[in-house]
Amino acid sequence: MVGLGTTWLTLSYGAAFGAVSIGPWTAWPKNGTREIDPYARAAIARSGELPIGSGDGIAFMARADSIGRLLDGNCDVLVSGVTPQARFWTLTLYNRRGLLIGNSINRHGFTSQEIVRRADGSFDIIVAPRARSGNWLPTNGVDSYLLVLRLYDSPVGLATRAAREVPMPAITVQSCT
Protein backbone atom coordinates (compact mmCIF):
# COMPACT_ATOMS: atom_id res chain seq x y z
CA MET A 1 0.00 0.00 0.00
CA VAL A 2 2.82 2.39 0.83
CA GLY A 3 4.45 1.68 -2.53
CA LEU A 4 1.21 2.25 -4.43
CA GLY A 5 0.55 5.45 -2.47
CA THR A 6 3.98 6.92 -3.15
CA THR A 7 3.73 5.94 -6.83
CA TRP A 8 0.36 7.70 -7.08
CA LEU A 9 1.78 10.83 -5.37
CA THR A 10 4.80 10.83 -7.67
CA LEU A 11 2.66 10.48 -10.79
CA SER A 12 0.18 13.12 -9.60
CA TYR A 13 2.58 15.76 -8.34
CA GLY A 14 5.77 14.90 -10.17
CA ALA A 15 9.27 14.07 -9.08
CA ALA A 16 12.23 16.37 -9.44
CA PHE A 17 14.66 13.87 -10.95
CA GLY A 18 16.95 15.76 -13.31
CA ALA A 19 15.23 19.10 -12.72
CA VAL A 20 17.00 22.36 -13.54
CA SER A 21 15.82 25.31 -11.44
CA ILE A 22 16.55 28.95 -12.17
CA GLY A 23 14.83 31.18 -9.62
CA PRO A 24 11.12 30.23 -9.56
CA TRP A 25 11.38 28.43 -12.91
CA THR A 26 11.94 24.65 -13.14
CA ALA A 27 12.52 22.50 -16.22
CA TRP A 28 13.09 18.82 -16.82
CA PRO A 29 15.41 18.81 -19.86
CA LYS A 30 15.54 15.01 -20.11
CA ASN A 31 11.75 14.67 -20.51
CA GLY A 32 12.02 14.99 -24.28
CA THR A 33 14.88 12.48 -24.58
CA ARG A 34 15.55 8.77 -24.29
CA GLU A 35 17.14 9.39 -20.87
CA ILE A 36 13.80 10.32 -19.28
CA ASP A 37 13.38 8.78 -15.82
CA PRO A 38 10.66 6.13 -15.37
CA TYR A 39 8.52 8.30 -13.06
CA ALA A 40 8.46 11.18 -15.53
CA ARG A 41 7.69 8.74 -18.35
CA ALA A 42 4.72 7.34 -16.38
CA ALA A 43 3.46 10.84 -15.48
CA ILE A 44 3.60 11.92 -19.13
CA ALA A 45 1.83 8.74 -20.23
CA ARG A 46 -0.87 9.35 -17.61
CA SER A 47 -1.40 13.01 -18.58
CA GLY A 48 -1.15 12.52 -22.33
CA GLU A 49 1.18 15.53 -22.66
CA LEU A 50 3.80 15.65 -25.36
CA PRO A 51 7.08 17.04 -24.02
CA ILE A 52 9.29 19.28 -26.13
CA GLY A 53 12.08 17.27 -27.75
CA SER A 54 15.56 18.23 -26.57
CA GLY A 55 16.49 19.36 -30.09
CA ASP A 56 13.47 21.66 -30.27
CA GLY A 57 13.65 23.52 -26.97
CA ILE A 58 12.85 23.40 -23.29
CA ALA A 59 9.83 24.20 -21.10
CA PHE A 60 10.17 25.94 -17.73
CA MET A 61 7.32 25.90 -15.22
CA ALA A 62 6.68 28.28 -12.30
CA ARG A 63 4.17 27.52 -9.54
CA ALA A 64 5.40 30.24 -7.18
CA ASP A 65 6.85 33.75 -7.29
CA SER A 66 10.54 34.59 -6.89
CA ILE A 67 10.33 34.33 -3.06
CA GLY A 68 8.35 31.09 -2.99
CA ARG A 69 4.70 32.20 -2.58
CA LEU A 70 2.29 30.08 -4.63
CA LEU A 71 0.74 31.93 -7.56
CA ASP A 72 -2.79 33.04 -6.66
CA GLY A 73 -5.32 34.08 -9.31
CA ASN A 74 -6.71 36.81 -6.99
CA CYS A 75 -3.35 38.61 -6.91
CA ASP A 76 -1.69 40.95 -9.38
CA VAL A 77 1.58 39.30 -10.37
CA LEU A 78 4.36 40.93 -12.41
CA VAL A 79 6.49 38.77 -14.71
CA SER A 80 9.37 40.98 -15.77
CA GLY A 81 12.83 40.95 -17.25
CA VAL A 82 14.26 39.10 -20.21
CA THR A 83 14.28 35.52 -21.40
CA PRO A 84 17.28 33.39 -22.33
CA GLN A 85 18.36 33.43 -25.95
CA ALA A 86 15.80 31.62 -28.10
CA ARG A 87 14.53 31.90 -31.64
CA PHE A 88 10.94 31.92 -30.31
CA TRP A 89 9.28 31.65 -26.89
CA THR A 90 5.82 31.41 -25.40
CA LEU A 91 4.52 32.17 -21.91
CA THR A 92 1.23 30.40 -21.13
CA LEU A 93 -1.09 30.42 -18.12
CA TYR A 94 -2.58 27.11 -16.89
CA ASN A 95 -4.64 25.98 -13.92
CA ARG A 96 -3.13 23.44 -11.51
CA ARG A 97 -4.47 20.53 -13.57
CA GLY A 98 -2.59 21.78 -16.64
CA LEU A 99 -5.62 23.15 -18.50
CA LEU A 100 -5.87 26.61 -20.04
CA ILE A 101 -7.79 29.07 -17.88
CA GLY A 102 -10.92 30.20 -19.70
CA ASN A 103 -11.55 33.93 -20.03
CA SER A 104 -13.75 36.24 -22.08
CA ILE A 105 -10.93 37.59 -24.27
CA ASN A 106 -9.42 34.17 -25.08
CA ARG A 107 -5.96 35.34 -24.00
CA HIS A 108 -3.99 32.42 -22.57
CA GLY A 109 -0.43 33.57 -23.15
CA PHE A 110 2.04 35.65 -25.08
CA THR A 111 4.70 34.91 -27.67
CA SER A 112 8.05 36.56 -28.25
CA GLN A 113 6.68 38.08 -31.45
CA GLU A 114 3.64 39.84 -29.94
CA ILE A 115 4.93 41.05 -26.58
CA VAL A 116 5.35 44.79 -26.04
CA ARG A 117 8.94 45.44 -24.91
CA ARG A 118 11.00 48.31 -23.58
CA ALA A 119 13.89 49.71 -25.62
CA ASP A 120 16.39 47.42 -23.84
CA GLY A 121 14.42 44.30 -24.85
CA SER A 122 12.97 43.64 -21.40
CA PHE A 123 9.23 43.32 -20.80
CA ASP A 124 6.55 43.40 -18.13
CA ILE A 125 3.55 41.07 -18.12
CA ILE A 126 0.81 41.56 -15.54
CA VAL A 127 -1.05 38.37 -14.58
CA ALA A 128 -4.19 39.56 -12.80
CA PRO A 129 -7.92 38.95 -12.39
CA ARG A 130 -8.90 42.43 -13.67
CA ALA A 131 -7.95 44.14 -16.93
CA ARG A 132 -4.67 46.06 -17.06
CA SER A 133 -3.06 48.10 -19.78
CA GLY A 134 -0.11 46.63 -21.65
CA ASN A 135 0.78 42.96 -21.55
CA TRP A 136 -2.02 41.44 -19.43
CA LEU A 137 -2.93 37.80 -18.83
CA PRO A 138 -6.33 37.28 -17.13
CA THR A 139 -6.52 34.74 -14.29
CA ASN A 140 -10.31 34.82 -13.90
CA GLY A 141 -9.65 34.71 -10.16
CA VAL A 142 -8.70 31.02 -10.01
CA ASP A 143 -7.32 29.79 -6.70
CA SER A 144 -3.91 28.94 -8.09
CA TYR A 145 -2.18 28.63 -11.43
CA LEU A 146 1.13 27.94 -13.08
CA LEU A 147 3.10 29.68 -15.78
CA VAL A 148 4.92 27.76 -18.50
CA LEU A 149 7.74 29.43 -20.44
CA ARG A 150 8.71 27.43 -23.53
CA LEU A 151 11.96 28.32 -25.28
CA TYR A 152 12.27 27.04 -28.84
CA ASP A 153 15.60 26.62 -30.62
CA SER A 154 17.49 27.70 -27.52
CA PRO A 155 20.97 26.77 -26.28
CA VAL A 156 19.50 26.34 -22.78
CA GLY A 157 18.79 22.72 -21.98
CA LEU A 158 20.39 19.34 -21.63
CA ALA A 159 23.63 20.20 -23.41
CA THR A 160 24.10 23.44 -21.47
CA ARG A 161 26.00 23.20 -18.21
CA ALA A 162 25.59 26.94 -17.53
CA ALA A 163 21.78 26.76 -17.39
CA ARG A 164 21.66 28.30 -13.92
CA GLU A 165 23.38 31.47 -15.16
CA VAL A 166 20.90 32.32 -17.92
CA PRO A 167 18.57 35.30 -17.41
CA MET A 168 15.00 34.35 -16.53
CA PRO A 169 12.04 36.64 -15.89
CA ALA A 170 11.37 37.52 -12.26
CA ILE A 171 7.92 36.80 -10.81
CA THR A 172 6.70 39.27 -8.19
CA VAL A 173 3.36 39.52 -6.39
CA GLN A 174 2.22 43.18 -6.58
CA SER A 175 -1.01 43.08 -4.57
CA CYS A 176 -3.83 40.71 -3.58
CA THR A 177 -7.56 41.32 -3.28
Image (tube, rainbow, N blue to C red):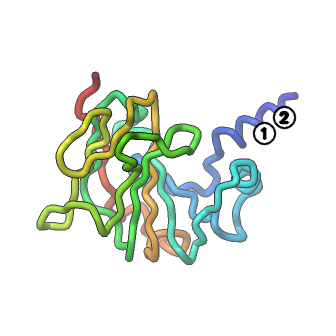
Q: Nearer the viewer, residue 139 or 13?
A: 139
**Image position, residue 12 (x, y; %):** 68, 39
**Image position, residue 153 (x, y; %):** 46, 76
In the rendered structure, which amino acid carries the disc numbered 2? Answer: Leu
Residue 22 is tagged as none
Residue at x 30% of width, y 69% of height: 113
Farthest residue, direction left? 119
The picture quadrant where one finds residue 55 is bottom right
Label 2 residue SS: helix
The picture quadrant where one finds residue 115 is bottom left
Residue at x 46% of width, y 41% of height: 101
Q: Nearer the viewer, residue 165 or 174?
A: 174
Residue at x 35% of width, y 57% of height: 110
How many badges with numbers are in the image?
A: 2
In the rendered structure, which amino acid carries the disc numbered 1? Answer: Thr
Instruction: Please name the residue that numbered disc 1 is placed on.
Output: 7
86 shown above or below 10: below
Label 1: few (<14), some (14–19) or many (≥20) C-alpha neighbours in 10 Å = some
Q: Quadrant of the C terminus?
A: top left
Farthest residue, direction front? 104
Residue 4 is tagged as 2
Question: Gap between marks 2 and 1, in whole Å?
Answer: 5 Å
Residue at x 27% of width, y 46% of height: 136
Label 1 residue SS: helix
Q: Quadrant of the N terminus?
A: top right
Q: Nearer the viewer, residue 174 or 114?
A: 114
